Image (spheres, grey):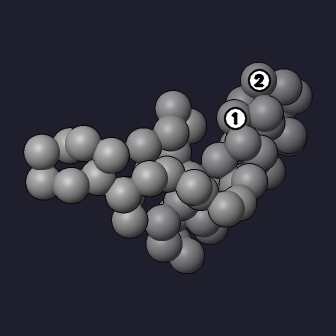
């Protein structure tokens, strides 16, 4: 299932690890908005609806 949210949720362990590393980096440089984006991305579960072949939900 692909994530259709504005801030995409990780779909694989590698994507989750990359976002967690980005969160650590944002915290280290004091990037508050970056921290919020990373936290939103790591929030589970992703409840994006499945779409059919034409894109309808």
Image-quadrant location for residue 18: bottom right
Residue at the extreme front: 57
Residue 7 against residue 44 in the figure, above or below: above
Q: Please, what secondary structure does the residue beneath circle 1 have? A: helix
Residue at the extreme left: 54
Seen in the image, is 35 located left or right of residue 41?
right
Q: Are marks 1 and 2 in contact (CB under 8 Å)?
A: yes
Q: Position of residue 37 (x, y in %)?
A: 69, 35
Determine which residue is flagged by label 2. 33
Q: Position of residue 49 (x, y in %)?
A: 44, 53
In front of the other: 33 or 47: 47
Instruction: Give the class, few, some or many, for how many residues have Cα within 10 Å of label 2's Cα (few <14, many ≥20).
Output: few
Task: Using the rendered image of the protein, determine whether residue 14 is visible from the camera's viewpoint.
Answer: yes
Determine which residue is flagged by label 1. 37
In front of the other: 43 or 52: 52
Q: Please, what secondary structure does the residue beneath circle 2 have? A: helix
Residue at 49% over, 51% down: 48
Seen in the image, is 25 located left or right of residue 1?
right
Residue 51 against residue 31 in the figure, above or below: below
Q: Position of residue 20 (x, y in %)?
A: 70, 58
Residue at 85% over, 40% down: 27
Seen in the image, is 49 located left or right of residue 51?
right
Image-quadrant location for residue 16: bottom right
Residue at 51% over, 32% down: 6
């Amino acid at each position: 299932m692909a994530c259709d949210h504005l801030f995409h949720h990780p779909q694989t362990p590698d994507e989750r690890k990359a976002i967690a590393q980005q969160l650590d980096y944002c915290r280290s440089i004091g990037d508050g908005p970056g921290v919020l984006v990373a936290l939103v991305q790591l929030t589970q579960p992703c409840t994006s609806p499945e779409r059919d072949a034409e894109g309808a939900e």
